Image: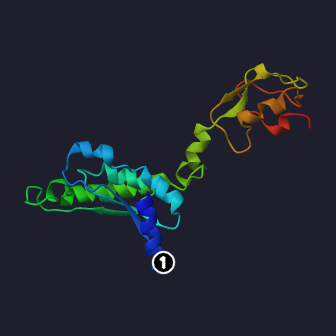
Amino acid sequence: MEDVERAVESIQKYNSELILMQCNTNYTADPENFKYINLAVLKEYGKIFPDAVLGLSDHTIGYATVLGAIAYGARVIEKHFTDDKTRNGPDHKFSTLPGEWKEMVKASNELFYALGDGIKKIENNEKETAVVQRRALYYCTDLQKGHRIIEQDLIALRPIKPDELPPYKKDQLLGKKLVKNVQADSPVHEEDFEC
């Protein structure tokens, strides 16, 4: 890491726009090399050099390392390309063929979008299904006006509609008095209770 820190410091004296690439320089295409790629160092680079764009210079077969690097924050990928893996030279055996390149780019884009922004929320494509997937409080049995709610009166079931109460509000309802008769398997609403 000291070598990397010195290199970054030297470069940034002249140019603050830096792409910091992780690279294992073994060109043998040996599957054993996957153990030495150390993609996790990209996380450290991101902490130590927050202004640098991260990347991977890859010399492995396939594109598993590319996907892993993207997951760790890499936005630049250097990967060897060939039209024939049997050509002479150290690069061709681990290089990517045109069809593999296309698959790698497709998978990389899918992964990049799938990573998201890290903010947990109901996404646009699940707003309709959130109604079906989430639960609301429902009455277990028929209850009469004036009844005080106990835990056994309520159950969490699907679906939940905008005016219905989620299960986390159950404790707030215990001991409250009903202002009307309610039926079993009907959803619980705020207006069912005295204020």
Q: How is the image coloured?
A: rainbow
- In the image, taking residue 23 as reference, residue 174 lies left or right, namely right
Question: Quarter of the image containing the C terminus?
Answer: top right
- In the image, taking residue 181 as reference, residue 73 lies left or right, namely left
Which residue does the image show at 88% across and 24% down from the upper left? Answer: 148
Looking at the rendered structure, the secondary structure element under dot 1 is: loop
Between 50 and 101, the residue placed more toward the observer is 50
Which residue does the image show at 45% across and 68% down from the upper left? Answer: 8
Q: Position of residue 113 (x, y in %)?
A: 45, 56
Q: Position of residue 102 (x, y in %)?
A: 26, 59
Which residue does the image show at 44% across and 73% down from the upper left? Answer: 10
Task: Determine which residue is flagged by label 1.
Answer: 13
Between 103 and 166, the residue placed more toward the observer is 103
Query: Above or below — where is 175 with respect to 67?
Result: above
Q: Position of residue 125 (x, y in %)?
A: 52, 52
Query: Above or below — where is 166 with respect to 64?
Result: above
